Amino acid sequence: MADSRALYEQVILDHTKNPHNFKALDPCDHKAEGFNPLCGDQFTIYLNMNGEVISEVTFEGSGCAISKASASLMTTVLKGKTVTEARALFEHFHEMVTSAPDTEINEAAVGKLRVLGGVRDFPIRIKCATLAWHTFTAALEGHSAPVSTE
Ligand code: ZN
């Protein structure tokens, strides 16, 4: 257990140091800005769609290690997913990070996002971890007003 925790921390650190898909998309089909005033995390999510399929998703901005790692991981898992699959994944992810620390994590449902499971032990970090996802949802739905986690 301690070993897997260390592994997860390493993955998070790698994403924070070398975030994936960390760039603007121009032109893009959708974009949205998100802000977590509790921590100061602020990201813009960019999306390109091919019908119902997410063909490209990138992000820009700044934030704490958890928010940045979560945004980076999100962009890697969403590429090639349909909108329906993406929404389901967010639901499972949200369920994991808001679950009680002693409940079992549905590893099959969350996949690579499992590394962020430790967030549920730190309730103040839940908004950091979900900011990119809320912002992604806003981009999908075409909201032009910035998203705030407050
Ligand atoms: Zn944060």
Image (cartoon, rainbow, N blue to C red):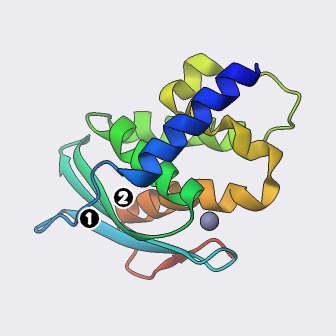
State whether residue 69 is above or below residue 146.
above
Give the SS element for disc 1. strand
> Which three-letter amino acid code belongs to the residue tagged 2?
Leu
Residue 103: x and y, percent? 85, 26
Relative placement, left or right, of 62 versus 35 is: left
- Residue at position x 51%, y 45% in the image: 13
Q: Is mark 2 within 8 Å of ligand 1?
A: no
- Residue at position x 75%, y 23% in the image: 2
Ligand 1, image quadrant it occupies: bottom right
Residues packed near mark 2 inside 10 Å, few (<14), some (14 to 19) or many (20 plus): many
- Residue at position x 46%, y 80% in the image: 146
Q: Which mark is residue 3?
A: none
Residue 61: x and y, percent? 39, 71
- Residue at position x 42%, y 33% in the image: 85
Residues packed near mark 1 inside 10 Å, few (<14), some (14 to 19) or many (20 plus): many
Give the SS element for disc 2. helix
Q: Which mark is residue 30?
A: 1
Residue 31: x and y, percent? 30, 68
Q: Quadrant of the N terminus?
A: top right
Residue 43: x and y, percent? 43, 70
Residue most toward the left?
Answer: 27
> Which three-letter amino acid code belongs to the residue tagged 1?
His
Q: Quadrant of residue 84?
A: top left
State whether residue 67 is above or below residue 20.
below
Looking at the image, which is closer to me, 129 or 9?
A: 9
Residue at mark 2:
140
Q: Quadrant of residue 91?
A: top right
State whether residue 52 is above or below residue 60.
above
Looking at the image, which is closer to me, 94 or 66?
A: 66
